[in-house]
Image (cartoon, helix red, strand yellow):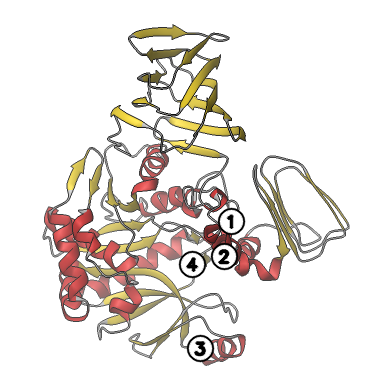
């Protein structure tokens, strides 16, 4: 019996959904369409596939703990694996690494790998399951299957797949101009490129050895030299460094003669922009999508999302407004693809807003920056029950901790003290220290940092239960 091995690619950054999506907390981790993240919805969806094996998730180092936390919320127990990419090298190496890892576990020819991006919306799960079953049959016969989404309009934000009457792929097309997209739609044999694939490990490896031998060779070594870290398996950074960075379309799909397209009408969207999200969400009688605390007057066909503050809008039309704690985006909704240009500029100017939110998540909880000035910084720190920070020291800053909720077990130099609400401690620069939550409710405290340098890289770790060295 054919078994399906889901492989979920969760390494993207989703820059076109800034300021909500950031490099350290990207699109796949956000709750955009319901109360679960896109990643969680993807993991839940593959659990309903007939003969599905426990999922394997490929993710970058920066996102490993929040990814694990979100998957654990689904209650899968031990039934999943997270593969860590120490270096981002695009989709071809990520997929090749997953194939080599799976091949090392089992060479069962009846296993078909199902490659899925973590950040897509699929509303028709029944149609998805039917398409997977069709793709698995074709993949078992030696095909490399790509899922082609039946186009609903002349979309310029997607790549296209051209198929013939037999379902064989004739060509892949880059994102077209509007006139060309209209021609594709009229032709009837072009599909949106979903980035989803199905194949056997044997077929994939043989085709990669023919068309992308440097990638499969490097990733074979990266897996062989990788290391197990609890729930995680980390590819070798040294071997990945020599791996070319290429998309799976360019490295393999555009070159192989085994590519087959399965047409699918799934209620699919890659949610690649704010306009794409606007189109899949429910709109009110004036064509508006409102999320959060929003008050509108004489506003039409707009998307307004408030995260922390109330937004009042008057007389807007076809407008996008997104508010977060540290940034506000305003643009014509039709130009939401250009948000990437803002992110590129923030990167060039070395601003933190492209990478971090005001709240930063850590494996033990999170911290929020409340105020920052040249010589002091104030944070709210939340530590989850039974979790603890690393044993560490700072060269350039002193810290004052005030507990506002729960209990804190504090290592401060040679002393270990238990603090309750409205109690505090002072940690001078150079003192080895650690913060732990021994209780069953979240610990919240206010941290005031004072010093000549307040950067997160002024941390010397001596011991860390999460295996972090940085």
The secondary element bearing badge 4 is classed as loop
Give the answer, above or below, for where 470 lies relative to 166.
above
Circle 1 is placed at which residue position? Answer: 18
Circle 4 is placed at which residue position? Answer: 266
Is 273 left, or right, of 49 in this rendering? right
| Residue 20 shows up from this direction | yes
Is 99 left, or right, of 91 in this rendering? left
Circle 3 is placed at which residue position? Answer: 188
Circle 2 is placed at which residue position? Answer: 340
User: How far from the left and from the top, in percent, is residue 147?
Assistant: 39, 73
User: How far from the left and from the top, in percent, is residue 18?
Assistant: 58, 56
Considering only order in the chain, which callout, 4 or 3, is on the residue closer to the N terminus? 3
Cα gap from disc 4 to disc 2, whole angstroms? 27 Å
Cα gap from disc 1 to disc 3, whole angstroms? 34 Å
Give the answer, above or below, for where 314 lies relative to 444.
below
Q: Are marks 1 and 2 in contact (CB under 8 Å)?
A: yes
Cα gap from disc 1 to disc 4, whole angstroms? 26 Å
Task: Mark 1: give few (<14), some (14-19) or many (20+) Cα within 10 Å.
Answer: many
Considering only order in the chain, which callout, 2 or 3, is on the residue closer to the N terminus? 3
């Amino acid at each position: 019996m054919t078994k399906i091995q889901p492989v979920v690619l969760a390494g993207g950054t989703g820059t076109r959904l800034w300021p909500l999506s950031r490099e350290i907390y990207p699109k796949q981790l956000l709750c955009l369409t319901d109360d679960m993240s896109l990643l969680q919805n993807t993991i839940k969806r593959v659990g309903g596939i007939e003969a599905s094996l426990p999922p394997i998730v490929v993710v970058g180092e920066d996102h490993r703990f929040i990814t694990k936390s979100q998957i654990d919320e689904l209650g899968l127990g031990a039934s999943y694996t997270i593969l860590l990419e120490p270096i981002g090298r695009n989709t071809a190496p990520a997929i090749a690494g997953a194939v080599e890892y799976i091949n090392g576990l089992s060479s069962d020819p009846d296993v078909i790998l199902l490659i899925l991006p973590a950040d897509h919306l699929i509303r028709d799960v029944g149609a998805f399951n039917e398409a997977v079953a069709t793709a698995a049959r074709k993949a078992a016969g030696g095909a490399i299957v790509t899922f082609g989404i039946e186009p609903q309009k002349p979309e310029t934000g997607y790549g296209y797949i051209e198929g013939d009457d037999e379902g064989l792929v004739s060509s892949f097309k880059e994102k077209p101009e509007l006139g060309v997209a209209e021609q594709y739609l009229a032709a009837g044999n072009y599909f949106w490129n979903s980035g989803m694939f199905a194949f056997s490990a044997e077929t994939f490896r043989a085709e990669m050895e023919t068309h992308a031998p440097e990638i499969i060779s490097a990733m074979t070594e990266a897996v062989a030299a990788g290391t197990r870290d609890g729930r995680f398996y980390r590819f070798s950074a040294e071997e990945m460094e020599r791996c070319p960075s290429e998309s799976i379309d360019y490295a393999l799909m555009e070159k192989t003669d085994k590519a087959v397209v399965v047409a699918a009408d799934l209620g699919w969207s890659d949610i690649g922009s704010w306009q794409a999200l606007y189109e899949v969400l429910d709109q009110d009688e004036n064509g508006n999508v409102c999320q959060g605390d929003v008050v509108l007057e004489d506003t039409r066909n707009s998307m307004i999302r408030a995260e922390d503050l109330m937004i009042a809008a008057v007389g807007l039309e076809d407008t996008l407004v997104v508010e977060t704690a540290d940034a506000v985006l305003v643009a014509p909704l039709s130009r939401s693809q250009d948000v990437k240009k803002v992110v590129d500029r923030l990167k060039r100017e070395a601003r933190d807003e492209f990478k971090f939110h005001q709240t930063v998540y850590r494996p033990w909880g999170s911290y929020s920056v409340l105020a920052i000035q040249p010589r002091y910084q104030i944070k709210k720190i939340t530590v989850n029950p039974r979790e603890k920070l690393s044993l560490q020291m700072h060269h350039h800053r002193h810290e004052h901790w005030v507990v506002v909720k729960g209990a804190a077990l504090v290592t401060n130099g040679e002393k270990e003290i238990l603090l309750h609400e409205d109690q505090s401690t002072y940690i001078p620069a150079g003192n080895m220290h650690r913060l732990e939550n021994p209780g069953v409710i979240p610990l919240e405290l206010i941290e005031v940092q004072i010093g000549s340098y307040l950067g997160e890289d002024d941390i010397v770790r001596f011991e860390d239960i999460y295996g972090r060295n940085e």
